């Protein structure tokens, strides 16, 4: 009895779809960005990370002594430990100018943290002198890179031997080199490194092992992969404006949706005030009418949310690229549906208050 | 004969203070079970107000309303919907059907409100629509029915829950004379058949012959109250 008015129904649906699309797209983009920031730690294959105490997220910064690596290898429960170097480097472009990359130096014996998702070239070629792997999506920006291209990084001539796909954090892209080259390019002091990655032996709980390592190692922070990812996420959320930016856009979408749906439902009730009055006169309780309104609100919310999610899905596929990938895991989709139901229920409260105030006697007046 | 309706000094004042309107002065009225009673009187005389008090739509400002021995005027405001559902079938001036529902679903509505299962509610609704001569129009929406047909659907809706009271407020107002007469005849006939006590507000003196008793209001008080020939010959004052 609200929904038979096609125009109003369309209005409510538009509100829900709009809110779903905007909130979904913002959430997806934000999560996609978060994933890019946590991608390295998530994919490097280490259970535990050892780092300078000041480190908040996976980024270049202070260094630690390589004693940590040696000590870690001797701790019970450690299956392997490997060093990692990370630092900013400047690549000179052939046409003039320069771009930044985050250079990752890996230990060639284990290649832990090494380039993955290769779309061209060969990881083993990193062992060649002056060999580096770059991100495919950045080839143009880095001056039209190809396998075999020569470039100058921090004053060193390097040769491109491969490309990764999609390794784009929020910031300069990753480039990979062997330990020896990375140390030279980044001018790392002797016996210093950025991170130690640790693999736990089978059956050893990373949590317990991290605590044991922390007790035995001085001047470093030891955390599991999961806490490192969590730290990175909370850093991005709390210390950067990214979270607020996306959050406020999503909130804006929800608010606009709430207003559209709320006002449309209210005006639908006003249009049908006689019918609601009739129902009251013949004995419908406020609760019956609330159920009717809220039930219809939930039905529209479900339909609108599904349409909205289908549109977000379309958008996600359309814009999908290494630089921008919407990340919409099913808990987020489910949350969106629940949020839309809540939105519509809240929106229906305004209409409901109008219905509650209706006097059944009004139906006797012509 | 037992009484269906008793109003004892019942009055109604709308609003308070300077804007207060005493629409119904303290009124006594007793209607026995099954009596076919018409409420008549000029516009603004308080007919709808009296009907609303009897129908548990409003509570009297003072005095009592007793339906079938139950002092409904003493009940709490929030119990009134259930009382209406259980005791009263309403027919309004406009048909007041739900536009988006078929005739069948409109008639089934009061049963659905009492929690009757859908199938049973529809069966009973179909039966009543048959009784008002609309057995073939079950699936029609109100917009596809004539004025008289809509009012017959409204009668079926009022009676489907077999309430003991049928209250109609100017049910013929939007109909032509013939259709209006037919609608009231139908209400009278079904009321007799289903042992319902009907109270019908009307302006239309061409149908007064269908009443057994005519109560006339003016200025918020009963000014005449008489049994008609249809009541069994005795014409005269009933009080
Ligand atoms: N809700 C209300 N608030 C204030 N005054 C009201 C209200 N309802 C009715 N009245 C007033 O009470 C008086 C009686 O009204 P009521 O509707 O009972 O008359 P009626 O006999 O049904 O008239 P009509 O034939 O025009 O329907 C009128 O003066 C009317 O203006
Ligand atoms: Mg009236």
Image (tube, helix red, strand yellow):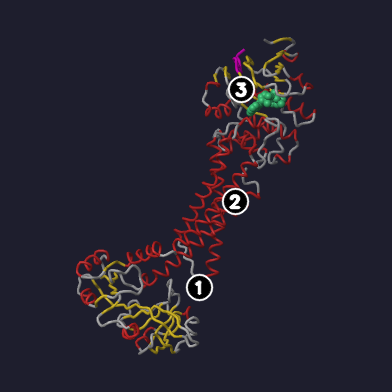
Residue located 60% across and 32% down the image: A359
Mark 2 — residue?
A: A12
Q: Is residue A233 visible?
A: yes
Give the Cα separation between the discs numbered 3 and 2: 41 Å
If the picture is divided into quarters, which one holds ligand 1? top right
- Subunit ID for the residue under disc 3: B
Mark 1 — residue?
A: A321
The stretch of residues the image draws in magenta is: B1-10
Per the picture, the main secondary structure of the magenta-coloured stretch is: strand
Q: Residue A280 colored magenta? A: no
Q: Quadrant of residue B92?
A: top right
Residue B184 position (above or below residue A255): above
Q: Earlier in the sequence, mark 1 or mark 2?
A: 2
Q: Residue B8 colored magenta? A: yes
Question: What secondary structure is found at the residue carrying circle 3?
Answer: strand
Mark 3 — residue?
A: B13
Residue A127 position (above or below residue B17): below
Can you give x and y, in whole percent of width and height, for residue B155 in the image?
A: 68, 30
Q: Residues within 10 Å of mark 2 (few under 14, many from 20)?
A: many
């Amino acid at each position: 009895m609200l929904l038979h008015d096609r125009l109003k129904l369309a209005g409510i649906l538009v509100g829900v779809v709009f809110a779903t699309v905007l909130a979904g797209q913002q959430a997806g983009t934000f999560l996609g960005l978060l994933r890019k920031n946590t991608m390295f730690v998530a994919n490097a294959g280490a259970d535990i990370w050892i780092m300078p105490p000041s480190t908040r997220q996976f980024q270049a910064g202070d260094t630690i002594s390589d004693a940590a690596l040696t000590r870690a290898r001797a701790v019970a429960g450690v299956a392997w430990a490997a060093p990692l170097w990370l630092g900013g480097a400047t690549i000179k472009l052939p046409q003039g100018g320069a771009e930044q990359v985050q250079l990752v130096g890996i230990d060639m014996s284990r290649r832990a943290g090494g380039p993955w998702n290769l779309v061209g070239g060969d990881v083993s070629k990193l062992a060649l002198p002056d060999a580096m792997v770059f991100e495919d999506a950045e080839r143009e920006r880095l001056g039209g890179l190809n396998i075999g291209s020569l470039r100058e990084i921090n004053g060193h001539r390097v040769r491109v031997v491969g490309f990764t796909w999609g390794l784009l954090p929020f910031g300069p892209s990753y480039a990979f080199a062997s330990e020896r080259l990375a140390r030279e390019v980044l001018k790392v002091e002797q016996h210093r490194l950025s991170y130690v990655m640790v693999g736990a032996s089978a059956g050893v709980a990373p949590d317990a092992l991290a605590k044991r390592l922390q007790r035995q190692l001085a001047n470093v922070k030891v955390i599991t992969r999961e806490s490192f990812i969590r730290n990175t996420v909370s850093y991005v959320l709390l210390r950067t404006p990214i979270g607020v930016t996306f959050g406020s856009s999503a909130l804006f979408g929800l608010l606009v949706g709430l207003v559209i749906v709320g006002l449309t439902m209210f005006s639908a009730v006003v249009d049908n005030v006689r019918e609601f009055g009739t129902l009251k006169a013949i004995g419908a309780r406020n609760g019956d009418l609330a159920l009717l309104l809220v039930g219809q609100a939930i039905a529209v919310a479900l339909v609108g949310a599904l349409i909205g999610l289908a549109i977000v899905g379309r958008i996600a596929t359309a814009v999908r690229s290494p630089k921008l990938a919407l990340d919409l895991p099913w808990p987020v989709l489910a949350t969106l549906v629940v949020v839309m139901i809540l939105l519509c229920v809240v929106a229906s409260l305004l209409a409901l208050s109008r219905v509650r105030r209706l006097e059944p006697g009004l139906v006797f007046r012509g | 004969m037992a009484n269906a309706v008793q109003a004892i000094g019942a009055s109604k004042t709308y609003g308070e203070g300077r804007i207060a309107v005493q629409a119904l002065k303290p009124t006594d009225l007793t209607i026995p079970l099954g009596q076919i009673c018409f409420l008549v009187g000029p516009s603004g005389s308080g007919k709808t107000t009296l009907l609303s008090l009897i129908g548990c739509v409003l509570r009297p400002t003072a005095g009592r309303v007793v339906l079938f021995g139950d002092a409904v005027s003493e009940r709490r405001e929030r119990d009134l919907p259930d009382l209406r559902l259980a005791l009263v079938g309403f027919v309004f001036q406009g048909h007041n059907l739900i536009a988006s529902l078929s005739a069948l679903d409109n008639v089934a509505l009061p049963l659905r409100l009492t929690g009757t299962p859908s199938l049973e509610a529809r069966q009973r609704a179909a039966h009543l629509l048959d009784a008002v001569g609309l057995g073939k129009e079950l699936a029609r929406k109100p917009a596809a029915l004539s004025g008289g047909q809509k009012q017959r659907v409204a009668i079926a809706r009022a009676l489907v829950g077999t309430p003991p009271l049928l209250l109609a407020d100017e049910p013929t107002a939007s109909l032509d004379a013939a259709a209006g007469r037919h609608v009231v005849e139908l209400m009278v006939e079904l009321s007799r058949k289903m042992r319902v006590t009907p109270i019908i507000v009307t302006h239309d003196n061409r149908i007064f012959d269908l009443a057994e008793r005519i109560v006339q209001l003016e200025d918020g008080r009963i000014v005449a109250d008489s049994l008609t020939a249809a009541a069994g010959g005795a014409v005269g004052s009933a009080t």
